[in-house]
Image (cartoon, grey):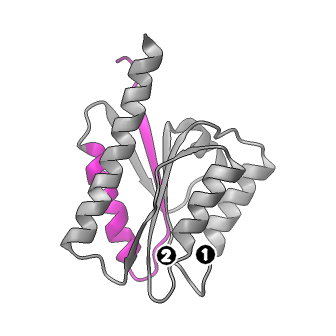
């Protein structure tokens, strides 16, 4: 395989719980050969276009996702960046309700036409060992999926 496949993980975290999840997702994705993983706290819309897979991490605040993630997705939409068919996934921590990762999946699937792995991972408060294993598995699943599709398309 000539080109390294790229998994982009964009997340926001205030308490550090979603950041722990992001790092575990990164570990899982990096465990797959031929994968380049980039983890960012902030991404420009074009960066999403350059990735083979996009994993978004967002904690839930007051039954909603944070404004930074909303702004990013809004910009992707406004700039008409094509994410159709890209592999996507979402995760996030929450205190009460946990809607943000579900909203992300809906947007990726219905607004951008991405190939989304469901359900998103939602962990209440601080992720424990089992939760972090789930995150690693998500990263690995996403990475394996883009490797498989790259191999399928190369012939």
Q: Which residue is outermost to the top?
A: 155
Rendering coords of residue 149 (x, y %): 44, 27
| Residue highlighted by disc 1 | 66
Rendering coords of residue 44 (x, y %): 62, 51
Up/down of 90 relative to 113, above or below: below
Q: Which residue is outermost to the front?
A: 119
Label located before the other in sequence (2 or 1): 2
| Residue highlighted by disc 2 | 59
Which range of residues does the magenta coloring cover? 1-30
Up/down of 90 relative to 125, above or below: above
Residue occupying image coordinates x 49% and y 69%: 12
Q: CA distance from mark 2 to mark 1?
A: 8 Å
Q: Is residue 33 magenta?
A: no
Q: Are marks 2 and 1 in contact (CB under 8 Å)?
A: yes
Up/down of 152 relative to 64, above or below: above
Residue occupying image coordinates x 36% and y 84%: 125
Relative depth, front residue between 36 and 143: 143
């Amino acid at each position: 395989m000539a080109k390294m496949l790229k998994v982009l993980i964009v997340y926001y975290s205030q308490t550090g719980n979603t950041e722990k999840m992001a790092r575990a997702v990164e570990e899982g994705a990096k465990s797959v050969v031929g994968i380049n993983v980039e983890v960012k706290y902030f991404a420009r819309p074009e960066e999403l276009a350059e990735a083979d897979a996009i994993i978004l991490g967002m904690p839930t605040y007051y039954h909603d996702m944070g404004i930074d993630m909303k702004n990013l997705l809004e910009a992707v939409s406004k700039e008409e960046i094509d994410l159709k068919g890209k592999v996507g996934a979402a995760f996030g921590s929450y205190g009460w309700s946990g809607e943000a990762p579900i909203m992300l999946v809906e947007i990726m699937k219905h607004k951008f036409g991405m190939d989304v792995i469901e359900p998103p991972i939602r962990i209440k408060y601080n992720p424990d060992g089992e939760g972090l294993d789930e995150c690693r598995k998500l990263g690995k699943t996403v990475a394996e999926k883009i490797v498989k599709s790259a191999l399928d398309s190369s012939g």
